[in-house]
Amino acid sequence: MEQLNIFGDTLPPVSLPSNLMEYHQKIFDAEESRTFMETFIHTVPWEQKTATMYGKEIITPRLMAWYGDTGKDYAFSGTKYDPIPWTDELLKIKLVTERIAGISFNSVLLNYYRDGNDSVAWHSDDEYELGINPVIASVSLGQARRFDIRHKADHQNKYSITLEDGSLLLMKGDLQHNWEHRIPKSTKPLRERINLTFRVIHH
């Protein structure tokens, strides 16, 4: 897998096991990505939610929206999301993603990172509704951002990958149970990014 390196510069690059992650570059070209971005920025009913992290209530440092099949609500960090019906653009991205993943998804979480100040803290997508060893397909549009991964039992066992415009990252195996991930803040001036994580909700 390309562009996956351990933090720092004292150790050589190392690949994360393919049973945990797959990285696919350019599943959408720059023009497609830009069109999707403009549409989502101006049409999605973005919300900034209050979440519970480590026992404290915080305002999420990004905007969010939940889409999916009827009845596929989702609860995490103390907040429940009822799905908004699929749009044509989301269904197009979903179809391409499903062809690569070999899985039919029934929901998607959209995250809108407006600049380098927007982020997501260390967490795992291990909610009950996702089942055991869920496959989550993460599509990135816009600004490339660093994606960090670390093992829950050993924080020195950690990796970083740059999620590029138009790329797909498949997270699978026991990644959500034994690892956690984040998008860190950046002091560099960054452009807008939208991330779509397609999921299968089990009720």
Image (cartoon, rainbow, N blue to C red):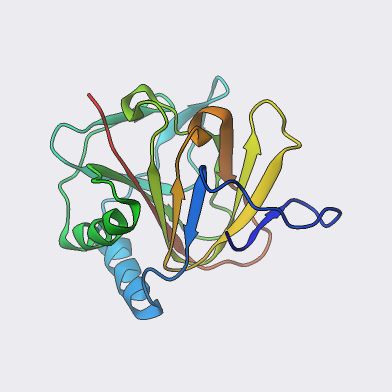
* Residue 117 appears left or right of 113: right
Task: Residue at 57%, 29% (x, y): give it.
Answer: 178
Quadrant in which the C terminus appears: top left
Rendering quarter of residue 166: bottom left
Which residue in the rendered view is the most extreme toward the right? Answer: 10
Task: Give x and y (percent) for residue 107.
Answer: 25, 42
Which residue in the rendered view is the most extreme toward the top? Answer: 55
Task: Give x and y (percent) for residue 27.
Answer: 38, 68
Task: Give x and y (percent) for residue 92.
Answer: 21, 63
Rendering quarter of residue 31: bottom left
* Residue 6 appears left or right of 149: right
Q: Which is more toward the observer, 185 or 101?
A: 101
Q: Which is more toward the observer, 196 or 77?
A: 196
Quadrant in which the N terminus appears: bottom right
Q: Which is more toward the observer, 90 or 27?
A: 27
Q: Is residue 119 above or below residue 128?
A: below
* Residue 120 appears left or right of 42: right
Q: Which is more toward the observer, 98 or 65?
A: 98
Task: Residue at 53%, 52% (x, y): give it.
Answer: 118
Task: Give x and y (percent) for residue 197.
Answer: 37, 48
Q: Is residue 143 above or below residue 172?
A: below
